[in-house]
Image: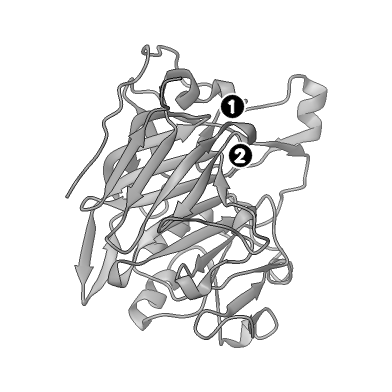
Amino acid sequence: MLSVAMLAGCAAGTEGPQPSPSATSPREAAQTDVAPLRGLVVPKGTLEHASIAAKIDNHPLARPQIALDRTDLVFEELVEGGMTRYVAVWHSDIPDVLGPVRSIRPMDPDIISPFGGIVAYSGGQDRFVALMRQTPVYNAIHGQPDTEATFYRSDAKPAPHNVHVKATELLAEHTDLAAPRKQFNFAADLPSSTAVRLGTRTAVVNYRFSDYSFGTWNWDAPTSAFLRSQQGAPDVDANGARLSATNLIVLRVPVTVALDIPKTEMIGSGEAWVSSGGATVRATWTKKSAASTIALIDDNGVAVKLAPGNSWIELIPLAGSVEHTAPTAG
């Protein structure tokens, strides 16, 4: 049953598109870059390498996952049995090890193509692997000759939830691959983000993919981030720290099913909500092709600007639900 809390924005903005965050002087600009997937200012030349996307397991036996706390972006998607998996993307902070990785699904080429770089996964049905191989992304697949040195099974978890990737070593084998392009628009800082300027105050975001997969994001002012829970429990990384997001992006997406495999339809448009700084603004998402980035346009027709930092993107089926709750008075 669809249950969506509609958000009324604050005063309408009238400004046109603004540039991404930049240094404040020509000298500083010559010494810095802007991280394309986080919007943070970084020293010049430090991110001139490819990104690594990986198909990350979200089965209870796979938790806690390794290095989800260090991602630039995480997409959560519906798979079989009402469960979810992640497409996680690392660029600003490449971990030594990430995982566990699982098999590819039919929507993943449309999600991963805009990043270029590398995609790491454990395999999959031939038809889905073929689709992924047709993209401009290097396919690093468990069990292949080119990944013998960088993929391994851990004894810490049972198979198939134990395939890990030596990410820094994998990246070092592919120095010829280009850095990703910018995926979203970023404000210069948190107060300048679209959600903070124009949005409605938000304390809690509840989401539901299915009766099995559901969770909550709670705004945490001390850390300026939304903290993640799933299935009623805090969601933590391998070090026990709560997973969090500077930006929470919710896209309402159609899901089709063929031969019992759900496919999130990423080419098209639909409703979206963007939460940053404890506030949420309604938007429309559009993706024109597999290679296109996801455009987010607010109700005033202006491109949404995220706060600099990491982002989680919840790909909520039309049959699922999302609800945004305002802070309680007092």
Q: Residues within 10 Å of mark 1 (few under 14, many from 20)?
A: many
State yes or no: discs 2 and 1 in contact (Cβ < 8 Å). yes
Quarter of image, res 77: bottom left
The image position of residue 328, as x and y in percent, is 41, 26
Callout 2: SS:
loop
Q: Amino acid at mark 2?
A: Gly
**Is 272 on the left or on the right of 189, as rendered?**
left
**Is 187 on the left or on the right of 330, as rendered?**
right
Q: Nearer the viewer, residue 3 or 18?
A: 3
The image position of residue 322, as x and y in percent, is 31, 43
The residue to which callout 1 is attached is 190
Quarter of image, res 118: bottom right
**Is 105 on the left or on the right of 241, as rendered?**
left
User: Is 73 rendered above or below residue 162?
Assistant: above
The residue to which callout 2 is attached is 309
Which numbered disc, 2 or 1, marks the residue that appears first in the sequence? 1
Distance from Cα at disc 2 to Cα at disc 1? 9 Å
